[in-house]
Structures are given as structure tokens and as C-alpha cells.
Image (tube, rainbow, N blue to C red):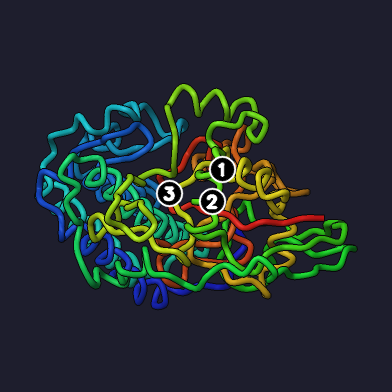
Amino acid sequence: MPPSSPVTGASLLERYLPIRATSEALCRPLAVEDHVPQPVVYASPPKWHLAHTSWFFETFVLARVRPKQSPWHPRYAYLFNSYYETVGERVARQHRGHLSRPTVDEILHYRQHIDECMVACLRENLSHEVMELIELGLQHEQQHQELLLTDIKAILGGNPLQPPYASGQVATWNLVDEHRATGMQDESDWLDMEGGLHAMGHEGAGFAFDNEGGRHLQHLRPFQIQRQLVDNLAYLAFIEDRGYQRPELWHAEGWDWLQAEGIEAPMYWSRDEHAVLGWAHYTLTGPQALLPGTPVTHISHYEAHAFAQWAGCRLPTEFEWEAAQSRLQWGQRWEWTASAYLPYPGFRQAPGAVGEYNGKFMANQMVLRGASFATPPGHARATYRNFFHPPMRWQYTGLRLARD
């Protein structure tokens, strides 16, 4: 299990119901039909998220504290297991959008049942191990809230009508923040960082996932890192300088991906002669004119690397990012780094199904640091290690530059 501060049933109960309610609030602006589609294999239908996060508590907590209690439905474990091989077989990820049944109402009743059981459990005298599992489940649900927003955007943004998801406030998110300008990028605003040994990783009180430990020393050479993220105007200059047509800027795999997919701009961008910059992009509030001063969003690691090459710079490593994070503006976009997702020294994968949470994905993925507009409040940490395959860009991904 990940290191964490002591938790109590009372403190967990205080957070449990609000976190669970937030997931349902995020789905409230949707039509019933919006809960089912799976436009791409890496996105999941909203109702699948609602069910999976409930299955997590039923499987890892309730089955432990109430072993004689029958599952709510004998086939839900097959329908809503994500990737836990040691738990059993599951619906293939690419087929989640085929699940017209159970209905949204049936899944909401399932959630209500799980919540009633969990609230009763949280009022009992629970072991420390069980309380840590509940904490993990709450953090897991918050991860799925961010995925809900990005998957909803993929569903609606891929619709030819490009309907808005909502406007204004939804749960704790101000949707206007997605495309709000945060200030023009200042190319001279570089932060000088000293070399030497820097302590990395989580330690002390507070929750952290197992991949954030253990705390260790990392030697860094002196470097510079930009305080701000690359914005739309800077990225547009890359496009206009034929950045997507110049193979010398791209990794070989990135260039092959570019040609195979016909990529010419970040995801959700479209040309619009009436917009200030000549481009628009789809947002959760509908199509909007692209604004200078807004961090570029929805780019792959391949695109981030190519832009850095074009700019005569590079991406920071995750260790450089963590060493500098207290002096950076971050939290607007997940930031691609130059670091492969690998275990820290001393990392040990926990036994059983819970050990599958992070460790088994430490191959062929790149680390992202920071947080994004869609990250639930209070869920971001300086040591948080997000990770995706290099072509992925449906998440709120961006970049900042570094140089020696």
C-alpha cells in the first residue's frame, strides 16, 4: 500500500459521500444517450466510470469486511473490472461502449447500494489496512472524475454537432477555466536551477500513490526551465513554420504516427477564418476561438518533443520539473516530460490485485507532471506521476521548455 498519514473512519466518512456525489454531478448535464458511446478505445463511457468506481469499493473493501454478502449483480465484476487480472476476466476495453445494459438508472441504483454499505462500514471499527483501501478508493474515484471530463469531451467533441457539455459551474469546476488566457508567454522568463543532489519523491504525512516513492536523491546538472507553459500563440508559430511537415524535428515513431493519422494540429483544433488567430478549438462549453496566452492543450508527447526541437530547447525531465516546481506556474495542464515511466529506487509492487494499480504499467509510457484544469481540487501533488503512451493527447496535456 502507498504511504499515507493515519486515517480514521470518521475522516473518511466526511469525504466519502461528497466525492461520490461529485462523480454523479459531473454526469448530470448529460443526456442518457451521452452515457453510452465510446468514440475511441482509450476513452470510456460515462456510465462505465460510474459503475467501475462502485465496483472498486465492492470488490476491494466490502468483499473484505463483509465476506458473506453477495455481490449486487453476479456479472458486474465481468462488466466493470478495468485491468485487474488477478480478480478475473472482464469485458475487453474496446467493447465498453457496447454495454447498452445495464441502464443508467440501474447503475445509479448500484451506486446507491454501495454507498449505503460503505457508510455503514465506515461507522464500524475498521482495521488500518481497510481504511487505507478506502482512501485508495477515494483517490481512485477522483482520478476517474478527471477521466470523466476528458472522456465526455471526447464523446461530445467527436460528434459532428459539437454540442456544449455545459456552461459555467459544474460540481467544483468552472468550465470557463479550460480556455481562459493565463498571460502571454514571456520567452525571457527562464528560471535558473543549480545542479547537484535533489531529493525526489514522496515522504511524510499525506496520501501518495505507491509509484511516488521511495524518496531518493537525484543528481542534476545545472539547467533552465521556463516558468510558464507554452501557449497557443507560440505553438501556432510552430505550425506556421511547417513544424508538422519537417521530419527532422520528430522522433521516428512520432513521424510515422503523424503520417498514419494525418495530424496537422493539436486535438480539437479547427481552422476558423473569423477567429482572432484563425483557429478555433472544441471545449466543454462548445467551440471557442483560440486565444493567445492560453496554454496549448491536447498534444501528444511526439508533438511536445517536436515543438521543443523546433524551439531549440528540450523537455524537462520529471526530476528537473520536481526540483523546480515550487517556483513554477503549474496546475493548468499535465506537462509532458522527457522521462520514461520507471520505478523509483526501492519500489516494490504490493501483493495481490491492488499491486496492479501502477507498477505493471512501467513500460513504454512517458511521465507527465503537474495537474490540469480537470484535476479535482486537492488531488494534485508535486510528486504526482501521471503517465501515458506517447501518442495519447485526449487528456489535458501541454508542455514547458527546458535547456542546459
Q: Position of residue 388 (x, y in %)?
A: 53, 42
Give amino acid for label 3.
Gln
User: What mark, if any, has residue 181 been given in the picture?
Assistant: none
Placement of the N terminus among the 4 image quadrants? bottom right
Residue to which mark 2 is pinned: 237
Q: Quick check: marks 1 and 2 in contact, CB under 8 Å?
A: yes
Q: Position of residue 373 (x, y in %)?
A: 41, 64
Residue to which mark 1 is pinned: 241
Numbered disc 2: secondary structure = helix
Residue at (36, 69) in percent of width and height: 177
Count all numbered tags in the image, as a single digit.
3
Q: Earlier in the sequence, mark 1 or mark 3?
A: 1
Residue to which mark 3 is pinned: 395
Residue at (67, 50) in percent of width and height: 311
Dot 3, crowdedness within 10 Å: few (<14), some or many (≥20)?
Answer: many
Asked if residue 93 lies left or right of residue 389, the reply is left
Where 133 falls versus 78 (above or below)?
Answer: below
Placement of the C terminus among the 4 image quadrants? bottom right
Residue at (74, 65) in percent of width and height: 323
